[in-house]
Image (cartoon, coloured by chain):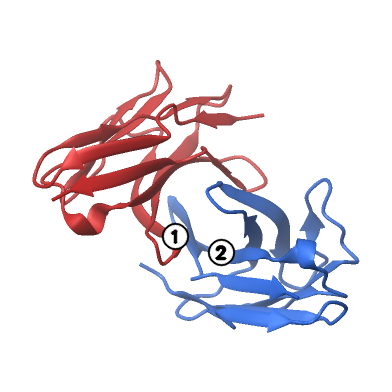
Chain colours: A red, B blue
Amino acid sequence: AQTVTQSQPEMSVQEAETVTLSCTYDTSESDYYLFWYKQPPSRQMILVIRQEAYKQQNATENRFSVNFQKAAKSFSLKISDSQLGDAAMYFCAYLSNFGNEKLTFGTGTRLTIIP
Amino acid sequence: GAVVSQHPSRVICKSGTSVKIECRSLDFQATTMFWYRQFPKQSLMLMATSNEGSKATYEQGVEKDKFLINHASLTLSTLTVTSAHPEDSSFYICSAIQRAIGQETQYFGPGTRLLVL
């Protein structure tokens, strides 16, 4: 079974600065997807970014980018120019490309933005 | 991204009553939807996989007679909490899979907060 580990329960960053959230995973599969979801105080889960394992290029969405290291099974999220609206719980998630389509979530990182 | 709605957003009920929560994919068809439960300050816990036209698949430890799931159409799944008790109070979230060639993504509803008195 796959596991996803987020070793930082809480992080904080000064507004306009850059922060990196860590995520590691364990799998024996070679083909899968990785996601970062954001859950603000409203509790709506919002997709931030996705990465296909077969792609070597790191995904980027505006101020959000990932550092995907397949051999190391690492998938960190970098948020540049942090804004107050970025404050939320961030969940890393794994999706196998074979079978049951279930997401495996990490335990989450609570990000605080300091004005 | 795709839109998934949930209704109601909040419900308060008396112990022993049943509560139905609806999950709809608004701009895409979803043959597969998921129901999660989230306790405060914790990650999402998958309860069951809802499959259009067939029986739901429940995760270990989830009572299927307690949490009835119906996926009657390609855009609607319902979760009914039967004979609700205070320990069923929680935040329930659904998600739906949008499939495109080379891409598969789960989009989440806004959640339903259930309080059983």
Question: Against A49, is A92 above or below?
Answer: above
Q: Residue at x 61, y 30 (%)?
A: A2
Question: Against A112, is A31 above or below?
Answer: above
* Total number of numbered discs in the rendering: 2
Q: Secondary structure at mark 1?
A: loop
Callout 1: few (<14), some (14-19), or many (20+) C-alpha neighbours within 10 Å?
many
- Label 1 lies in what chain? A
Q: Are marks 2 and 1 on the same chain?
A: no
In which quarter of the view is residue A85 placed?
Answer: bottom left
Residue B75 visible here: no
Q: Residue at x 45, y 63 (%)?
A: A43
Percent across and percent down for residue A105 are 54, 42
Question: Against A88, is A93 above or below?
Answer: above
Mark seen at residue B9: none
Q: Residue at x 63, y 65 (%)?
A: B92
Q: B11 and B51: which one is in front?
A: B11
Please, what is the three-letter code of the amino acid marked with disc 2?
A: Ser
Q: Is residue A36 left or right of residue A65?
A: right
Callout 2: few (<14), some (14-19), or many (20+) C-alpha neighbours within 10 Å?
many
Q: Is residue B29 left or right of residue B1?
A: right
In which quarter of the view is residue A8 placed?
Answer: top left
In which quarter of the view is residue A59 placed?
Answer: top left
Q: What residue is pinned by disc 2?
A: B95
* Residues at marks 2 and 1, CA–CA distance in whole angstroms: 9 Å
Q: What residue is pinned by disc 1?
A: A45
Please, what is the three-letter code of the amino acid marked with disc 1?
A: Met
